[in-house]
Image (tube, helix red, strand yellow):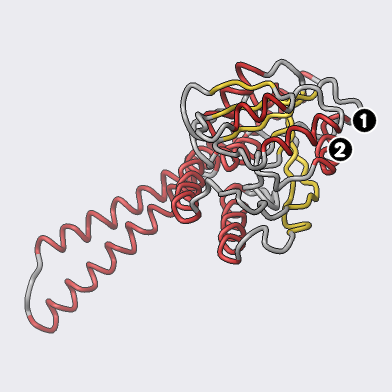
Amino acid sequence: MDYDDVCVLVPTYNEAETIGEVVADFRSAGFDDVLVVDGGSEDGTDDIADEHGARVVYQSGSGKGQAVREGVREHVDREYVLMLDGDATYRVEDAETMLEPLLEGDAEHVIGNRFADLREGAMTRFNQFGNRIINRGFSIVHGENYGDILSGYRAFTRESFLQMTLSSDGFGVETEMAVECAKRNVPTAVVPISYLPRPSGSDTNLRPIRDGGIIFLELYRRAKTNNPLFYFGSLGVLSTVTGLVIAAYVLVDWLTRGISHEVLAVVAGFGIIVGVQLLMFGVLADLILALHRETLQEIDRLDE
């Protein structure tokens, strides 16, 4: 397979133990453009990557998301991008599988499904559980099943990436990319890959609870424009149910003890009214979004 149009993008931060192996493997496999975006490593990651033949640039900010955005927009000039972490958990042997849907024109974005071959010790049970919950939540909210939206092994066209609206600076970038693919109807393929345990002496930059919380919030926030019925509907249900519970308490206390709670009654009424309005707004926003999508599809058919 010809890789002349492919740039291998590796965002890194303190990956001195593994970055040399990663760069060397991809260079040996025929990738002549391995771009390492360094986030200010303090362990010599940049020097090791350079020694093994990578093109090293330094991001202006911090975080994986910022590194990926800046790397693609400012330092990649090839048509295709193969993105992976610098921790040696992804295999160069899977690169051809990742790139095949792009090079054959079957997709513009490819996600490597780590659960197809999850090696022993590669992911804790806690992280496996969290990943599956997040993937399930994504499919419910955004209507697509991409199998493993948190996978760091991605392949995509530079053009499709530049059309995405991405703002996450940390590990939420994979979630944002998945949401943008669903939102913009980017042809997306999911392929099986292997996921290896980190080599001994290599420390992860991922903080499961903190980063998992950020990812959940990002999924929910992005639902506002991709699934407004879920976003506003869930808020509406919460407000309505809260109002009804307070109203029930006020009513029971008044009937049984003759005590009136005027302030709580006002709060209950306010919660119910706001909740119903949010539900109605969610329905209207969903109808508008559906109409907008139908209009865009009709325009695409006319252009063809």
Screen quadrant of the N terminus: top right
Tell me: residue 24, above or below residue 208.
above
**Residue where numbered disc 2 is placed:** 96
Write down the quadrant of residue 30 in the picture. Answer: top right
**Residue 259 x/y as whole percent:** 7, 75
Left-right relation of 264 to 289: left
* Distance (Cα) linking label 1 and label 2: 7 Å
Give coordinates of residue 21: x percent, y percent: 74, 39
User: What residue is shown with label 1?
Assistant: 1
Asked if residue 271 lies left or right of residue 176, the reply is left
Of all residues, the one furthest to the bottom in this rendering is: 256
Q: Please tell me which residue is depicted at 70% across the width and 41% down the height of the picture.
A: 153
Secondary element under disc 2, as helix, strand or loop, is helix
Give the label on residue 259, or none. Answer: none
Q: Position of residue 15 (x, y in %)?
A: 60, 39
Q: Are marks 1 and 2 in contact (CB under 8 Å)?
A: yes
Q: Camera-side residue: 131 or 181?
A: 131
The residue drawn where x is 67% and y is 41% is: 18
Q: Secondary structure at mark 1?
A: loop
Answer above or below: position of 131 versus 98: below
Callout 2 amino acid: Glu
Of the residues under marks 1 and 2, which one precedes in the sequence?
Answer: 1
Seen at 85% across and 20% down, the residue is 4
